[in-house]
Each structure stands twice: as structure tokens, then as C-alpha cells.
């Protein structure tokens, strides 16, 4: 038998000074492709980073690359987080910046980024084209990094990894933010690279996986336990019955308007590029909507209009909360009524704030806290922190927490002021199944009292029950609007052309 | 037109220099109401113009842009900035006559011609707003008596004005009313409302005067902010190369060093910055910064004197009239320095290494900040104003150096600052020649602590800490920084 590819003996790992693994042993043999699952905070990412040899991890890890293989003798790690810099080497962005035309030129184009990656690793440019096409990315080559949505950044990371074809490829939550078709295509691409000799370690709690996965393990209480493929299903999840804090279930006073949103022929374009085309959409007070569409279909642009984050709102005809947009209201008056979470908001959020500060800042719609909130807001925040099980992290900085915990804190921030309108754009990204179920149940609970909801999610099984209307976007236009009965018939069966 | 400040009797000069009131947030409870429904017309759509306009509109105000004909016809960047963000754009003739407030955000050098073109079109009783008082104070621009003249001056580059606003915060701001032009007494209320519209009220607002703003702003930018950072950077780089340090390393240390070092200044003042050094390095930095203060004091005083007397602005205006001959020559020279032409090396420098290996810059910054502050206060400027124009802005300018070195810094700052910066740099380099012969790589390029045992005399250290912490810039700074606690950290490579 040949030597194992990865051999881990007696590994101990810490995350932020706390032990995650102690005395871990794990062997990965040739032709094995592993799936690693586990709850958020279980140590999946720490382990992946250790194998990838990233700084701050040490222990006894041996990797034996195959000297006879044509593939690069390297471990490539696709992080669950993406990072980019502007042309001056800074990463000081704010999430609304994507929508500013004049900001576009300050970051590199996708094309330039790929060229420099290819040059660094001596890759052939023509080989990347088919990967770009399969992930629906070809048209984005001239876009600049700041203009990409979080799903598109994820794709860019994946494109690089699939182009590189390393001997060992570690993917940490690769499906985050990808639409249904891209997930399917990603699986096909992963099967292809595995056939060509790349070994995979896939960290994910999803169920639709590439067929080459032949070993499964779960991380539980600091141990890596091998499980069989069907054991890894999560059907029997227990959801705790903690009572929702009462300040969140008080019915809001009935507003004087019957429509929260009324859009009439709304258009957004950047030069020649039309990102929203003649959108007509009405959301009545108290309605629960799901907004769907492929990556790049215009979902986040549409939501940015509603949240007062898009400068072109002023050139369009639409009403929010009973007022015509641009008739003298300030964006802060709009934001006051909205609880927003989105992948972009998370990505650009002030990482140097504590969990507590981040949650309180939800009362002020700011990224970071700038004033003393006073007694009742503090008390409500504490109550919510307990509800989300974040007590022990209250004074921890956001950037010291694993992704899933950060996301929980931001979800608490989203609802802390009990807003009239909840905009939940893939709210459960980075959470495990149990947390997802739990959060969606909370949403159902909150929505009983007349809250209006717009929810973005690609999968039916991961939506709250209260949803009753659906709007589907395709290439910037409304493809269909309907109720949930006809909801999932034609979901995203869209092909990249 | 003659220098406005010089037309005032001494009593009134001191009076206006001394306007300085750190405003309570309760003064802004009326929000933008005073300007609600009024027509705000911004002239110029550059760094300040665009970003202030975006904020004002997002605060519910009615904003449009008046651009010069050439800019509209040529579809210049200013026209694109405004139209692509869906603002109404028009000529002076189309927009100014209906404006309640005209906001002049053109380059300072153009103010006289712009105001001369715009003023006859302004309706009776309208308001003219500036973000810098040079035109009024140094050029003595006379504004029609029915017009109210106010200033709202964000103490940050335009891009920050926008970034901080959308985060839900703002940037520290000075506001003022020109005492010669407040016929209806509405100036202050309008300035406050405008300040709320840009988000400035959340980050600390100083009520100032046109005179105090100009005299302190000029002094700060010429000496500590741009002048000394330029001189110190070039001398440090040249010294390292002379002593055989790798040029790529030297270039990186200098390019990013000022930013990392002044980040500590931003959070903890001069003593916070000095505390980042080991004890022996702190003692050394203290000693050489004392020496630097003695060497440079006369130069700082000369700059302040020339600013007060109007000598500085008249020399600069003579250069304007001469087609910017001096400015362009100096700018070209800066572009040719070895530091500018050596790309930062591909080496990793850890955050602490920027302090340990660049003690010289820590000493330069301490000397410059304290000298600028002291000189301003001696000249009659209030400590709070002096703080804004010295310590507060230093990290912001350092950030421009980190982005693209000195050439970038000089491109971002105003022509006025750039001109003063070169004047300072020309005079400061020869002044420091002797001092620099004694500097070795332990102060710049290598770790100061290497080969030392780390011991210091207790009493010396206590005495030094006492001097640092009791300086007035620290006392005033601690108070003002409380109001800007949430200033975000700047992330660089
Ligand atoms: N930059 C800062 O950090 C800062 C901070 C606080 C205050 N300020 C003050 O803000 C004001 C504007 O500075 P800025 O940095 O924003 O300037 P800027 O970026 O250079 O923009 C100037 C704008 O004025 C227009 N302009 C130039 N010459 C003109 C002329 N002769 N007539 C009419 N329009 C003209 C330009 O457009 P076209 O050439 O296309 O016409 C451009 O849009 C100044 O008073 C400055 O002191 C600046």
C-alpha cells in the first residue's frame, strides 16, 4: 500500500486560546474524498486551516504528495470567507460601495485578478474559460471586485481552486451563497477534478454533494468520528423551546399605509449594463415574501433600493412605507423601520466591535456603536443575547468568533428593534441545520404580529413556514410573481447561456 | 481685495481667533429642519462636492449641482459624478437664481472667479457656504450684504465623509458664521443643520470662526501634517539606503510606517504612541524629539508668523499668478526622489516592527505634533482648534502616504497645503542636516532593542512619562477623542 496522503498524529489545536482538538489522529489515504460536518463552532475550520498549513496552527501533520502526479504538489484551501483589496492595497470598504459607480475603478477587474493568479501559479488562461462558463461567471470578467456580490466572490474563489487543481483541495462551506444551478455545476466540476487526481476534503452540512465523496466524518465534542453516508442526515433535529423575549412579540401599532413597497417600472443601470429592468412589485403590510433568483439576477440590488442604500433610488418611481422615495425622507427614517441581514452586510461589518456592541447597534442601524443606548435598550439586548445563547461571547470581538457565531450575533442585531419590515437575505449562511431551523421558527414567531417579511433563500427546506408569496427574478427582470402554492414549480430552472 | 484678517484691529483679530466651542450634541436636536424643502445648489462636484451632496440628499434634503459650462459640455468627471448618481445638473444661470443655499466646493484657487460669477445670480437673502475659509480670510472676498456666509468644514477627505456617514457615523467638523455677513442671524442654525445633513454632528463639532479655521488649518497642513511627514520620510529613506539597508525594505517601512505609528496616535495621543516603544527606545525617542523640537522651533514659528501676517498667502498667490511655477517645479522634484521611485519590497513587516525599527519617525511625529500645537496656541489659537489641525489630522494624512507615497499625499491635499508643504520641506532639510549625520540604523531600519538589555532608570522613565502625559495636547485630546471614540481603524496591507 502506498503511504497515506495526510497523516495526523496526536494533534492539538486551539482557537482563540481555547482548545478545540486534543490528541486527534486522522489518516487520509489515496483516492479518499472526505466530507466533514459538524455544528458551528465545532472546529471544522480550525482543522482545515491546520492541514492547509496556515499560520497559527501547529501539530504533527504529514502530507505526502504524489511525486508521479502532474498536479501541483500543494494543498489549496478555499476559505469560508473571502477577502480582496483595492488597487492601493486597502480593504476599507463599506457595503453600499458596490452600488456607487465612481467606486468601481478602485479595485481590479475579475479578469486582471484571474490573470495575476494564473501567472503566479503558471496556469493556462484558456483552461479557465470552461470553469467560468460552468459557474455562470463568464460575463463578469470585466466587473471589478467591489461590484461582485458575495455569491460571486465565492464563485471567484472556487474558479481559482478548480483551475489550480491541487493534489489536495480543502473547501470550507463552498455552497454558501451559490444558487441551485451553480451548486449542481460545482458538484460536477468537483467530480471532474477528483477523477483527474485531486483529493477533496469538503466541509459542509449540505446534503447535495459530489458523488465522489466516499468517507464521512463528523466533528463532535473535539473528536473526529467517522459516520456512514446516511447517518449524516439531520432529520431528527431537536429545536429548543426557549421562550422568545416578550419585547419582540408585542404587536406593532397599525401603520397608516397599506403598502410597504410599491415599485413602478423600476430600472437600474450602470452605463450600458442593465441590472434591474422594469420591476413592478407591491408588498402589502404584513405580507411574507420569498425573493428568489440565480446569482447575479439582481436580488441584492433590488433589496438595496428598499434599504436606502442605492443612489439610483432617487431616479426611480417607488413608494416605501407610504412615502414616495426622495420626497424629503432621510435614509435613517427608512432604515429605522427595517431589520436587515445580508451576506454583504456581514462581510463589511465592523469586525472590531464586540458582540454586545454589534447587537445594540441594530437600534441605530450603524456598523459599530456610537452612543450610550440607555437602560431599556441595554436590558433588551442582554435578554436577546441569552436567547441566542451568546452570553459567554458578549464581550468578545466579532473577528475573534467563528463565522457561525458572528452570524448569530448579526441575526440578533437584525431583530433587536423589532422592526416593521424584516429583510433576511440568506440569513442562515454559515449556520448549522439546527440553528437554521431554530432561527426560521423564530421568524415565524415574530411574523405572527404583523411584521412584513422579505426572505431570500434558495432552498424550500430552509425557509420559514410563514411565507406565502414569491417573486422570482431572472437577469434583472421579474420572471414570476405568485403565491406559495405555485411556488416551487419553476424554481430557478434557469440555464446559464 | 485685501487680506480680511489684516483689516481687523488687534482686539477683533484676537476675538475671532479665539472662537472655539466644542458643541454639545443637544444643540443638533433640530436635525436638518432648518434646511428642509430649501434648494441646496452645490458648485463643483469633486471630492467634497460629490460626497457631501450624497449625504445631504440621503438626509432628506434637496440637492442639485451647478457646474461650469465646459464641465457639462465636455462631460467631465464632475458631470459624470453628479449625473450618474441621478442628481439634477445645470449651469449657473439655470440653478443659482433659485438656490436658497449655494455651496462653493470648487478648489480654493478658483474661489474668487467662481464667487464673482455666482454672486450676481444669487437671490436676495440667500446663503453662501464654504468648506474652507481661505477666500474670505486671505483674499478678503467681499460678499453682498444681504447674503449670509457660513462655513461647514469636514476635517476629513471626501471619501471618508461618505464612508463614515453610511456606517451611521460622521467625521469631525468645524462650523462658523462670517460676522460680516449674517444679516438675518440665521447663519448658525443653517450651519448646524447642514452639519447634521453630512453626519458631522455625530462625531464632534467645533464652533469656530473663518479666521481661526484658516490660520490653524494652514499652519497644521504646512508643518506637521504634510511638511514634516514629507521631510521625515525622505530623510529616513535616504539614511537607510546610505547605511546599506535593503531599499525595498526601507521603502516599505517608510511608506506604511507613518500610518501604523500614527494609528497609535489616533487612539491614545502622543503618549499612546510613545507607549508602543520599549522603555529604552522611549527614552531615546524622547531625547531626540526634544532635540528636534529645539532645532525646528524657529521654522515652525516662521510659518505661523507668515500665515498670520498674510505673507504666506500673498507669496502663494503670486505663484498662482505666475502659472504655478514654483509649485509645479517642487511637485516634479518630489516625484523624482529615491523614496518615491523605489517600490515597497515584498517583505512582511509586523505591526510592532514598525515601531521598533522606526523609532526616528516616532520622534519626528511627537516633535511635530507638539511643536505645531504649541506654536498655534502661542499665536492665539485655542487648544481645541489647534488639536484638530495637528494631532487629529496626522493619521489621515499618513493614510494617504501608505496608499501611494508622497506624490499621492500631495495630490489629495489642497494646492494650498501642497505649496506650504514644499516651503517647509525646502527649509527643514538643511536645518536637520547636522542632526541626521548622527542618526544610525538603530533609530531607523533596525530594531532599536537589539543587543540591549532593556533596562532603564526608574526616575528618568517616570519623569519622561510625566512630561508626555501632562502636555496640553494630551489633556485636550483625551477630552475630544471621547466624542470620536468610534473612529474606525484603518486597515492596510
Ligand atoms: N479635500 C479635502 O480633504 C477637503 C477637506 C475639507 C475641505 N475641503 C475644501 O473643499 C473645497 C473643495 O475641495 P475638493 O478637494 O473637493 O476639490 P476637488 O476635488 O478638486 O473638486 C473641485 C470641483 O470644482 C470644479 N472646478 C474646478 N475649477 C473650477 C472653476 N474654475 N469653476 C467651477 N468649477 C470648478 C471641478 O470640476 P470641473 O473641473 O469638472 O469643473 C471639481 O468638480 C475646497 O474649498 C477645499 O478647501 C477639502
Image: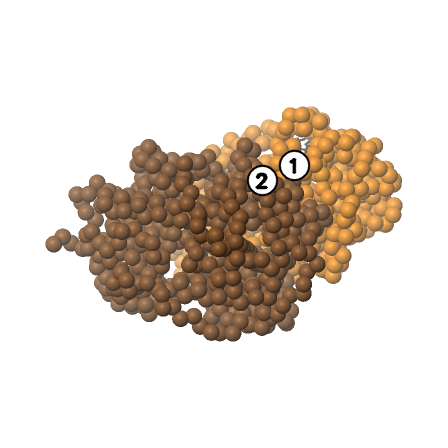
Q: Percent x, y for residue B205?
A: 70, 54
- Tag 2 and tag 1 share a subunit: no
Q: Are marks 2 and 1 in contact (CB under 8 Å)?
A: no
Residue A62 appears in the picture as rendered: no
Q: CA distance from mark 2 to mark 1?
A: 23 Å
Where is mark 1, residue-wise? Answer: B82
Give the chain letter at badge 1. Answer: B
Horizontal side of residue A392 vs A196, given as left or right: right
* The N terminus of chain B lies in quadrant: top right
Q: Percent x, y for residue A362?
A: 58, 61
Horizontal side of residue B439 vs B368, given as left or right: left
For image coordinates 46% across by 59% down, the residue present is A463
Q: Quadrant of residue B215?
A: top right
> Looking at the image, what colour scheme do you see?
by chain
Crowding at mark 1 (Cα within 10 Å: few <14, some 14-19, many 20+):
many
For image coordinates 31% across by 53% down, the residue present is A209
Q: Which chain is orange?
A: B
Where is mark 2, residue-wise? Answer: A278
Chain A: give its colour: brown
Q: Which mark is residue B357?
A: none
Amino acid at each position: 500500500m502506498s503511504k497515506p496522503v495526510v497523516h495526523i498524529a496526536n494533534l492539538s489545536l486551539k482557537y482563540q486560546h481555547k482548545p478545540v482538538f486534543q490528541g486527534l489522529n486522522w489518516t487520509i489515504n489515496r483516492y479518499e474524498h472526505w466530507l466533514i460536518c459538524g455544528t458551528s463552532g465545532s472546529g471544522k475550520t480550525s482543522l482545515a486551516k491546520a492541514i492547509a498549513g496556515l499560520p497559527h496552527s501547529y501539530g504533527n501533520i504529514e502530507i505526502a504528495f504524489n511525486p508521479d502526479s502532474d498536479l501541483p504538489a500543494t494543498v489549496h484551501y478555499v476559505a469560508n470567507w473571502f477577502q480582496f483589496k483595492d488597487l492601493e492595497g486597502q480593504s476599507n470598504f463599506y457595503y453600499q460601495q458596490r452600488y456607487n459607480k465612481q467606486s468601481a475603478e478602485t479595485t481590479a477587474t475579475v479578469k486582471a485578478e484571474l490573470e495575476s493568479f494564473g501567472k503566479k501559479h503558471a496556469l493556462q488562461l484558456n483552461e479557465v474559460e470552461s470553469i467560468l462558463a460552468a459557474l455562470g461567471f463568464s460575463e463578469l470578467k470585466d466587473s471589478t471586485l467591489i461590484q461582485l456580490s458575495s455569491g460571486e466572490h465565492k464563485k471567484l474563489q472556487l474558479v481559482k481552486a478548480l483551475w489550480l487543481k491541487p493534489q489536495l483541495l480543502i473547501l470550507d462551506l463552498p455552497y454558501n451563497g451559490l444558487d441551485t444551478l451553480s451548486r449542481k455545476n460545482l458538484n460536477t466540476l468537483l467530480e471532474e477534478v477528483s477523477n483527474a487526481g485531486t483529493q477533496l476534503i469538503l466541509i459542509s452540512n449540505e446534503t447535495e454533494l459530489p458523488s465522489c465523496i466516499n468517507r464521512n466524518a463528523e466533528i463532535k465534542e473535539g473528536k473526529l468520528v467517522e459516520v456512514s453516508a446516511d447517518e449524516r442526515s439531520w432529520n431528527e433535529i431537536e429545536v429548543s423551546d426557549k421562550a422568545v423575549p416578550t419585547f419582540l412579540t408585542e404587536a406593532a401599532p397599525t401603520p397608516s399605509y397599506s403598502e410597504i413597497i410599491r415599485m413602478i417600472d423600476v430600472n437600474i443601470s450602470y452605463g450600458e449594463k442593465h441590472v434591474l429592468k422594469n420591476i413592478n412589485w407591491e408588498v402589502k403590510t404584513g405580507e411574507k415574501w420569498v425573493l428568489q433568483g440565480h446569482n447575479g439576477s439582481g436580488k441584492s440590488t433590488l433589496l438595496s433600493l428598499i434599504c436606502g442604500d442605492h443612489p439610483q433610488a432617487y431616479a426611480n418611481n417607488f413608494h416605501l412605507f407610504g412615502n414616495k422615495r426622495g420626497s424629503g425622507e432621510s435614509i435613517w427614517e427608512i432604515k429605522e423601520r427595517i431589520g436587515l441581514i445580508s451576506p454583504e452586510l456581514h462581510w463589511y461589518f465592523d469586525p472590531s466591535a464586540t458582540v454586545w456592541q454589534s447587537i445594540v447597534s441594530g437600534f441605530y442601524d450603524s456598523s459599530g456603536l456610537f452612543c450610550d443606548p440607555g437602560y431599556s435598550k441595554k436590558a433588551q439586548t442582554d435578554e436577546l443575547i441569552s436567547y441566542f445563547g451568546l452570553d459567554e461571547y458578549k464581550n468578545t470581538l466579532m473577528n475573534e468568533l467563528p463565522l457561525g457565531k458572528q452570524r448569530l450575533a448579526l441575526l440578533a442585531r437584525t431583530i433587536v428593534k423589532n422592526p416593521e419590515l424584516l429583510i433576511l437575505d440568506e440569513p442562515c449562511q454559515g449556520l448549522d441545520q439546527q440553528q437554521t431551523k431554530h432561527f426560521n421558527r423564530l421568524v415565524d414567531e415574530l411574523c405572527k404580529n404583523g411584521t412584513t417579511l422579505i426572505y431570500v433563500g434558495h432552498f424550500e427546506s430552509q425557509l420559514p413556514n410563514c411565507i406565502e408569496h414569491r417573486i422570482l427574478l431572472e437577469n434583472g427582470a421579474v420572471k414570476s410573481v405568485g403565491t406559495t402554492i405555485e411556488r416551487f414549480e419553476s424554481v430557478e430552472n434557469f440555464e446559464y447561456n | 481685495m485685501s487680506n480680511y484678517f489684516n483689516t481687523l484691529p488687534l482686539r477683533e483679530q484676537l476675538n475671532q481667533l479665539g472662537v472655539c466651542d466644542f458643541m454639545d450634541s443637544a444643540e443638533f436636536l433640530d436635525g436638518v429642519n432648518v434646511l428642509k424643502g430649501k434648494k441646496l445648489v452645490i458648485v463643483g462636484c469633486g471630492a467634497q462636492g460629490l460626497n457631501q451632496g450624497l449625504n445631504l440628499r440621503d438626509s432628506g434634503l434637496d440637492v442639485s449641482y451647478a457646474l461650469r459650462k465646459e464641465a457639462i459640455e465636455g462631460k467631465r468627471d464632475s458631470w459624470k459624478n453628479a449625473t450618474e448618481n441621478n442628481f439634477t445638473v445645470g449651469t449657473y444661470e439655470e440653478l443659482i437664481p433659485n438656490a436658497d443655499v449655494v455651496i462653493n466646493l470648487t478648489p480654493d484657487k478658483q474661489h474668487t472667479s467662481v464667487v464673482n460669477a455666482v454672486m450676481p445670480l444669487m437671490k436676495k437673502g440667500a446663503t453662501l457656504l464654504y468648506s474652507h475659509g481661505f477666500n474670505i480670510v486671505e483674499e478678503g472676498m467681499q460678499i453682498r450684504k444681504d447674503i449670509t456666509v457660513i462655513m461647514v468644514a469636514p476635517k476629513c477627505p471626501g471619501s471618508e465623509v461618505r464612508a463614515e456617514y453610511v456606517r451611521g457615523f460622521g467625521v469631525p467638523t468645524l462650523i462658523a458664521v462670517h460676522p460680516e455677513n449674517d444679516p438675518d442671524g440665521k447663519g448658525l442654525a443653517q450651519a448646524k443643520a447642514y452639519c447634521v445633513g453630512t453626519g458631522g454632528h455625530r462625531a464632534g463639532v467645533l464652533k469656530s470662526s473663518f479666521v481661526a479655521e484658516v490660520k490653524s488649518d494652514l499652519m497644521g497642513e504646512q508643518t506637521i501634517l504634510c511638511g514634516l511627514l514629507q521631510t521625515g520620510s525622505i530623510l529616513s529613506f535616504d539614511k537607510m539606503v546610505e547605511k546599506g539597508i535593503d531599499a525595498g525594505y526601507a521603502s516599505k517601512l517608510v511608506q506604511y510606517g507613518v500610518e501604523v505609528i500614527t494609528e497609535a496616535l489616533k487612539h491614545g495621543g502622543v503618549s499612546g504612541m510613545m507607549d508602543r516603544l520599549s522603555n529604552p527606545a522611549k527614552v531615546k525617542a524622547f531625547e531626540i524629539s526634544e532635540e528636534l523640537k529645539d532645532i525646528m522651533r524657529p521654522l515652525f514659528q516662521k510659518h505661523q508668523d507668515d500665515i498670520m501676517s498674510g505673507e504666506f498667502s500673498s507669496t502663494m498667490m503670486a505663484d498662482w499668478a505666475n502659472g504655478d511655477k514654483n509649485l509645479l517645479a517642487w511637485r516634479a522634484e518630489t516625484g523624482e526622489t529615491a523614496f518615491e521611485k523605489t517600490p515597497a519590497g515584498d517583505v512582511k513587516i509586523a505591526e510592532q516592527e514598525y515601531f521598533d525599527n522606526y523609532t526616528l519617525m516616532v520622534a519626528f511625529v511627537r516633535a511635530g505634533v507638539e511643536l505645531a500645537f504649541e506654536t498655534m496656541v502661542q499665536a492665539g489659537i485655542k487648544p481645541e482648534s489647534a488639536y484638530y489641525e495637528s494631532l487629529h489630522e496626522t493619521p489621515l494624512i499618513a493614510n494617504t502616504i501608505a496608499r501611494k507615497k508622497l506624490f499621492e499625499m500631495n495630490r489629495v491635499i489642497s494646492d494650498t497645503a501642497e505649496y506650504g508643504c514644499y516651503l517647509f520641506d525646502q527649509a527643514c532639510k538643511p536645518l536637520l542636516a547636522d542632526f541626521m549625520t548622527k542618526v544610525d540604523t538603530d533609530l531607523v531600519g533596525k530594531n532599536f532593542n537589539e543587543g540591549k538589555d532593556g533596562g532603564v532608570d526608574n526616575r528618568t522613565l517616570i519623569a519622561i512619562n510625566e512630561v508626555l502625559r501632562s502636555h496640553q495636547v494630551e489633556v485636550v485630546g483625551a477630552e475630544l477623542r471621547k466624542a470620536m471614540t468610534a473612529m474606525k481603524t484603518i486597515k492596510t496591507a
